[in-house]
Image (cartoon, helix red, strand yellow):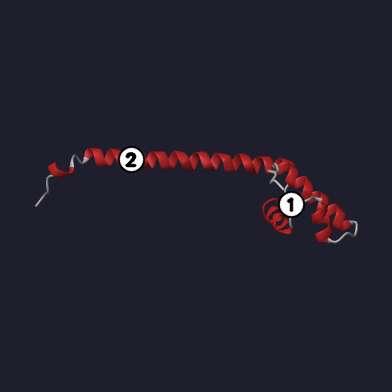
Amino acid sequence: MGRKKHTAEEIVAKLRQVDVLVSQGRKVAEAIRSIEVTEVTYDRWRSEYGGLTGDQVKRLKSLETENQRLRRAISNLTLEKLILKEAASGPEGQRQQNF
């Protein structure tokens, strides 16, 4: 069986579906099977998306994307700074030592 990548909105909908089924008296394991995911997946989803609404999930994902972009920018700037620092010090053999 192939793996399916669920969107954040689909995950929230499936978590709500499990909540409804449990409130109707079905067992949690049975409700999880009805949304066609494993208990491990359900637990992971519950810890990440539990209690969020669709709008909150969209906001969370956009913030995660922005955070990733900013981290990459900082990494690039740090690398450029190190390269410039090394270039400013000159070649290894021509360094002058101050005594």
Residue 29: x and y in percent read: 81, 60
Q: Is residue 53 visible?
A: no
Earlier-in-chain disc, 1 versus 2:
1
Q: Are marks 1 and 2 in contact (CB under 8 Å)?
A: no
**Residue at point 65% right, 41% down?**
59
Question: Which mark is on residue 10?
Answer: none
**Seen in the image, is 21 located left or right of residue 80?**
right
Look at mark 1 in the image and give the residue it sits on. 51
Residue highlighted by disc 2: 81
Q: Give left or right: position of 24 versus 96.
A: right
x, y percent for residue 94? 13, 42
Please state the horizontal and vertical placement of residue 54, each as a whole percent of the image: 74, 42
Q: Residue at x 70, y 44 (%)?
A: 4
* Quadrant of the image occupied by residue 62: top right
In whole angstroms, how far apart are the C-alphas of marks 1 and 2?
A: 43 Å
Residue drawn at x 83%, y 56% is 31
- Measured along the vertical axis of the image, is residue 54 above or below residue 38? above
Q: Residue flagged by tag 2: what amino acid is it?
A: Lys
Indicate left or right for 4 with 21 as reference. left
Q: What amino acid is labelled 1 in the image?
A: Gly
Comparing 41 with 82, the one in front is 41
The mark tally for this picture is 2
Secondary structure of the residue carrying tag 2 is helix
* Pointer 2 local density, CA inside 10 Å: few below 14, some 14–19, many at least 20: few
Identify the residue at the far right of this view. 24
